[in-house]
Amino acid sequence: MTTPGEEAPVTSDFVRSYVITGGRSLPSSDELALHTLVTLAPERTLPLGAGPEVRAIWELCAGGYLSVAEVAGHLGLPVGVARLLLTDLSEQGHLLRRAEPPRAQNVDRATLEKVLHGLQSLIG
Amino acid sequence: MDSNPSSAETAQKSIYVSSAVTNAAKILVVGHFAVGKTTFIGSLSEITPLRTEEKMTQASVHVDDLRGVADKTTTTVALDFGRLTLSDDLVLYLFGTPGQQRFMQLWEDMARGALGALLLVDPARLEETFPVIDLIERYGLEYAIAVNCFDPAATYSEAEVREALDLLPDTPVVYCDARDQQSSARALIALVRHLLERAA
Ligand SMILES: Nc1nc2c(ncn2[C@@H]2O[C@H](COP(=O)(O)OP(=O)(O)O)[C@@H](O)[C@H]2O)c(=O)[nH]1
Ligand SMILES: [Mg+2]
């Protein structure tokens, strides 16, 4: 607890996130949804000066498609930080993206029916 | 995390989504603390369920502070998720998080593009579900109720649950055991059927 007027201690986690993102504010989920699938585009070279987190994303995403949330989970990053780094890589043309959800919250019957059939096959 | 695959089978098992998959759907699994969200996701996920720690900045005002200065504190919330390949070209992601007003940013993220939400309910602690229903409704999510039967001896009728939670007549209420894959799948099926009716 800190008493009013006293500076609250800044946690090391906070400093870590701040360093990784360069103190930039995190993009919203409009940029990359948690379940958007991403992978490294073919024949790309790691950007010069890439930090350890970008290198880790690069290696992980070279293997195939994963959701934004899975990239964060595998690398132990908060989703906001993973999304920022992935957005940078995407803007630089290093990423392929799949399964972007529609911007509007519209329900897609065909997807719902596929989900239903898939779940029904689990209970046999 | 298990970084030491012990058999050839686990070594071969890829963490990646099959390359034929072009569509990813998302369903939220929500409910108060210890209602069984992590268990539910784990019973269905084909990957070891993953978890991230999300830092939430929360503005708080000291009532006893005469200057009325608001300061910011940071709390952490776990976001759990799992994955389920449902057909050659479709994967389903399940995202679980507690329903607390202070985690709004995370809810906004989760709600974006979600098909709907399965609300897990412990009938012995129904009142803890109200704040979660508020959040679901705030984000305009369609939902179904899955009553997680912790104590098989204690029976609560569907009518009791409906009345206590003040549900709309067409909101599905199913019973489930979050530890059981088939039972969890049935709960999701009830939700998806409801979503299809609402989309009609
Ligand atoms: N008896 C019983 N225990 C359960 C069931 N679902 C979850 N649990 C237990 O309840 C506790 C809380 O579950 P957890 O999944 O961690 O809840 P969460 O906080 O909502 O993620 C754990 O010890 C689970 O093993 C259930 O259906 N029946
Ligand atoms: Mg949990």
Image (cartoon, coloured by chain):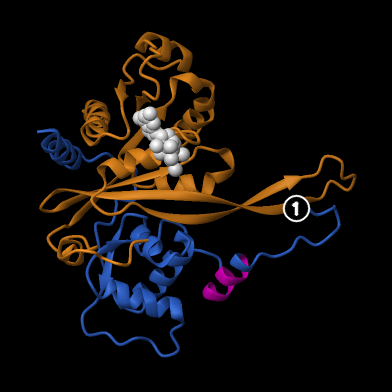
Chain colours: A blue, B orange
Dot 1 alpha-carbon crowd within 10 angstroms: few under 14, some 14 to 19, many 20 or more: some
> Residue B126's spot in the image, x, y percent?
49, 21
Identity of the residue drawn at 47% across and 13% down: B164
Bounds of the magenta span?
A: A14-21
Q: Please tell me in which quarter of the rendered image ligand 1 is found.
A: top left
Ligand 1 within 8 Å of the CB at mark 1: no
Circle 1 sits in a helix, a strand or a loop, which is it?
Answer: strand
Instruction: Name the chain letter of the residue that bears numbered label 1.
Output: B
Q: Residue at x 33, y 36 (%)?
A: B116
Residue receiving disc 1: B71
Q: Is residue B138 visible?
A: yes
**Residue most extreme to the right:** B66
Q: Is residue A18 magenta?
A: yes
Residue B119 seen in render: no
Residue at x 31%, y 49% (from the top left corner): B82
In-image side of B33 versus A8 (left or right):
left
Instruction: Give the x, y percent position of residue B127.
Output: 53, 21
Query: What type of secondary structure mainly makes up the magenta span?
Result: helix
